[in-house]
Image: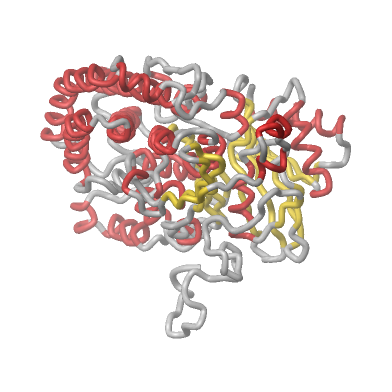
Amino acid sequence: MSKKDDKHIKAEHIEEKEYSILNLGPTHPATHGIFQNVLKMDGEIIHEATPTIGYIHRAFEKLAERRPYAQITPITDRLNYCSSPINNMGWYMTVEKLIKAELPKRAQYHRVIIMELSRIADHIICNSVIGVDTGAMTGFLYIFQWREKIYEIFEEICGARLTTNIGRIGGFDREWSKTTWDKINAFLAEFPKAFREFSNLLERNKIFMDRTINCGPISAEMALQYSFTGPNLRAAGVDYDVRVMNPYSSYQDFKFDIPVGKSGDTYDRFMVRQEEMWQSLSIIEQAIKNMPKDEPMHANIPDFYLPPKEEVYNNMEALIYHFKIVMGETDIPAGEVYHCVEGGNGELGFYLVSDGGRTPYRLHFRRPCFIYYQAYPEMIKGAMLSDAILTMSSMNVIAGELDA
Amino acid sequence: METQALFEKINQRLNETLPGCIEKAEVLYDFPVFHIKREQIHDVLKFLKEDDELHFHFLTDLTGFQTPDEQHLAVIYHLHNMPSNLRVRIKTFFPITHPEVPTATDLWPGANWMERETYDFFGVKFKGHPNLKRILNVDEMDIFPLRKEFPLEDQTRDDKDDKMFGR
């Protein structure tokens, strides 16, 4: 084209431009999980992204249609495996809603402690990984030992660390041991100091701020349109939190703030999660301080809650109940419930339809990751490749929850 | 607002603006539930979303369902009005031989993947959906796995007797 014609470039000439196609994933070390994105790139600018999901789909909803209620708990572990106890508790509460079981406050407070500990563990992973993706490995290595301590607490309560299967329908299987409480108290005493150091490393760090502010932003309106919930919605400035809106497990007894961001970018998502960890610590402290005494750890529902082991060995009725519950032969009433809890990533919902049989007729998980990940192509349009990685890790997309 | 009061309010408003759209209305646990005729489902969703008073602006969940007689499918919407914290469940039933429902992606872009998931598992065809193809299962799959006619276990096995335990 001669120089003279330059100003007459027409639209079709621009269309002819060649884009390069880049396969980001499915197993790429930077994406922390199995995500595939086919990126149409103009140099290093992302022009279009097409996500492919389902690489670790395990047919949980179909599996659940065949399993007795107690056996569905291990399935929920594997949804958001960074905070499995929240999923467990959410599932128990759904079934308890269906069978109309009332838990004593003491069991509910224990649940709150468990859920807030796992929220901290979940946010530790997300926030320290944001650090790693911006090039700050130190914070990640430093704060991850505290996640380890939380897992030690879980291990002390139920014997498992990651996929916990903690507690039971109706409450907890036993009292927490003294070691558990020692570990919780040690965590509460020492974690704030370490966490403050982690915050000092990143929160006002010039390089970190330059890197994350205005990276992958989403407006509040857009976030609502895309059914965002949890920290990602709050980072956009909407103060929606299931714990406050539809209190479950006695959350109405606790005083805590809902941190909100403004622009919904990576920095805001990071900061919202940081503050939520402080709030979680405060909730745990309140729960321990106001813990009711002399109450059982479970609801009075002999049809669904296993009798104590000594009675099973020495008492006929207890043995019958034990057998019926373990074999899944206690009928759950027919009904239809939706229950949601504030998971690590947002509103984790369970839509359960029971026809009165031993297994659910239909169980659907409302998985926050699955729903908000569809906005990802929109959020990274026009961004650099490295920003796309950062946006994904700050949205905390967990492959297990995404694919179910 | 109490669930019962909310139920009556929605019932009344729906009957006023879109008479005859409700097939069945009930309160199940803490949810008002409305069964809507398929022809009017899009109008009802649009009305619930855009009405100033009801203002169910948030699509919490969208999923599918098959009736026990295996002759009908359903699409189930959970809507949420965040400022007043009201929730409602909308269902629409239709025969399995003609599984077509208008899409909700024009109201909520977030319905896109949820509808794809419902198509993937139940074979519900959402009319007007921009990109209706399988999402979690492989593209080559030729069944809709969450339908009841496809049992979980290998259908060719006859050495297992499930009449005592299991569906």
Q: Nearer the viewer, residue A161 or B117?
A: B117
Query: How many numbered marks have been drawn onto this rendered protein structure?
Result: 0
Q: Position of residue A251 (x, y in %)?
A: 40, 24
Q: Position of residue B113 (x, y in %)?
A: 59, 47
| Occupied quadrant, residue A157 | top left
**Residue A145 in the image: above or below residue A84:** above
Residue A191 placement, left or right of B63: left
Identify which residue is drawn at 21% across, 52% down.
A309
Q: Position of residue A127 (x, y in %)?
A: 32, 30
Identify which residue is drawn at 56% across, 55% down.
B135
Residue A344 seen in this snapshot? no
Identify which residue is drawn at 49% across, 33% down.
A383
**Residue A243 in the image: above or below residue A132:** above
Residue A340 placement, left or right of A273: right
| Occupied quadrant, residue B97 | bottom right
Residue B166 seen in this snapshot? yes
Q: Nearer the viewer, residue B43 or A63?
A: B43
Residue found at the far bottom of this picture: B159
Q: Position of residue A73 (x, y in %)?
A: 37, 50
Q: How is the model colour-coded?
A: secondary structure
**Residue A391 in the image: above or below residue A78:** above
Q: Nearer the viewer, residue A22 or B156?
A: A22
| Occupied quadrant, residue A254 | top left
Which quarter of the rendered picture does the N terminus of chain A lie within? Answer: top right
Identify which residue is drawn at 74% across, 59% down.
B99
